[in-house]
Amino acid sequence: MITSEPDGREGLAAGEPAHDAAVAATARHVRAVIGTLRTLDLGTTAPAAMYHPGEERTVGTV
């Protein structure tokens, strides 16, 4: 249900406490995952546009 606040803001009505707790737990998990991803050093990783599945690229000689 959409509610209208006295100051003109609109938002979702407050849900049941169990639902709100599940949403909060999911948000914390997403933030934790994003925090972990931000710590990765991807400086030498090629952009996705450079990736072509199925193409073998060999470096060096045999």
Image: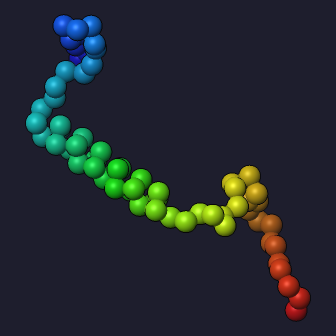
Q: Residue at x 76, y 65 (%)?
A: 54
Residue 42 against residue 31 in the figure, above or below? below
- In the drawing, does residue 55 fall left or right of residue 24? right
Depth order, front residue of 55/30: 30
State the image quarter where residue 53 is shown: bottom right
Residue at the limit of the structure toward the bottom, as seen here: 62
Q: Quadrant of the N terminus?
A: top left
Q: Residue furthest right?
A: 61
Q: Is residue 4 above or below residue 19?
A: above
Location of residue 32 in the rendering, given as x and y in whole percent from the top left corner: 34, 55
Tell me residue 15's x, y (percent).
Answer: 16, 29
The residue positioned 41% from the left and 61% from the top of the image is 36
Does residue 42 appear left or right of residue 47 in this picture? left
* 6 lies above or below 51: above
**Residue displayed at 55% across by 65% down:** 41
Q: Residue furthest left?
A: 17
Residue at 25% x, 21% y is 12
In which image quadrant can residue 56 be found? Answer: bottom right
| Rendering coords of residue 17 (x, y %) | 10, 36
Give residue 48's position: percent from left, percent from top: 69, 54
